[in-house]
Amino acid sequence: MAPGSALIPRLMDLSPGTEALRYCFALPAHPDSVAGARRLTRARLADWQLTGDTHDAAVLVVSELFTNAVVHTASARVVCELRCDAARLRVSVQDQGHEPGGPRLSLTSDGEHGRGLLLVDSMSAAWGSHDAGYHSGRIVWAELPYGPERTC
């Protein structure tokens, strides 16, 4: 990925008909910032007129991925990008430092922890993670298909 913009692919298809809406924000890696991430996501999706199940799922996915970045990494800030194109909404969250091996699904009996990625997995069509490059952390992403309520 290009330095300074690890969430944006190096090569973008700019041909007609491939428009995408993008929104990116960064917040301190602090538990209080999770509510801010949800608020910013809700506002942007409302601006994009994305409603219904996809809207609700996206807010939950942002909340879970942002929380994981705050709780499980040694980051000072967390960056979130929303990308809306003709087929899907992609949520990407980048931390500044991660545990080796990346995020893993966890099936624990603890009622408070371990279900975040299970929720992400159940709410999204696909998800994954990869190193951001240039030793700048890890990106965890999820893709949510649209319902009939909206096409960006």
Image (cartoon, rainbow, N blue to C red):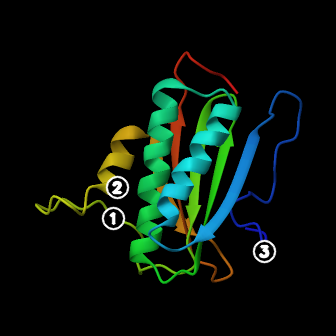
Residue 73, can we see it? yes
Which quarter of the figure has residue 67?
A: bottom left
The quarter of the rendered structure image containing the N terminus is bottom right
Q: Report how far apart the C-alphas of labels 2 and 3 lie in the structure.
A: 28 Å
Q: Specify few, some or many for label 1: CA neighbours under 10 Å numbering under 14, 14-19, or 20 or more.
A: few
Identify the residue position indicated by label 3 in the image: 3
Residue type (three-letter) at the residue carrying disc 2? Leu
3 or 1: tag closer to the N-terminus = 3
Residue type (three-letter) at the residue carrying disc 3? Pro
Q: Nearer the viewer, mark 2 or mark 1?
A: 2
In the image, what residue occupies the spot 82% across and 43% down? 13
Position of 144 with respect to 103 (left or right) is: right
Residue 123: x, y in percent? 39, 39
Identify the residue position indicated by label 2 in the image: 117
Quick one: SS at disc 2? helix
Q: Residue furthest left?
A: 109
Which quarter of the figure has residue 83?
A: top right
Quick one: SS at disc 1? loop
Residue type (three-letter) at the residue carrying disc 1? Arg
Q: Specify few, some or many for label 2: CA neighbours under 10 Å numbering under 14, 14-19, or 20 or more.
A: some
Identify the residue position indicated by label 1 in the image: 104
Quick one: SS at disc 3? loop
2 or 1: tag closer to the N-terminus = 1
Q: Report how far apart the C-alphas of labels 2 and 1 lie in the structure.
A: 7 Å
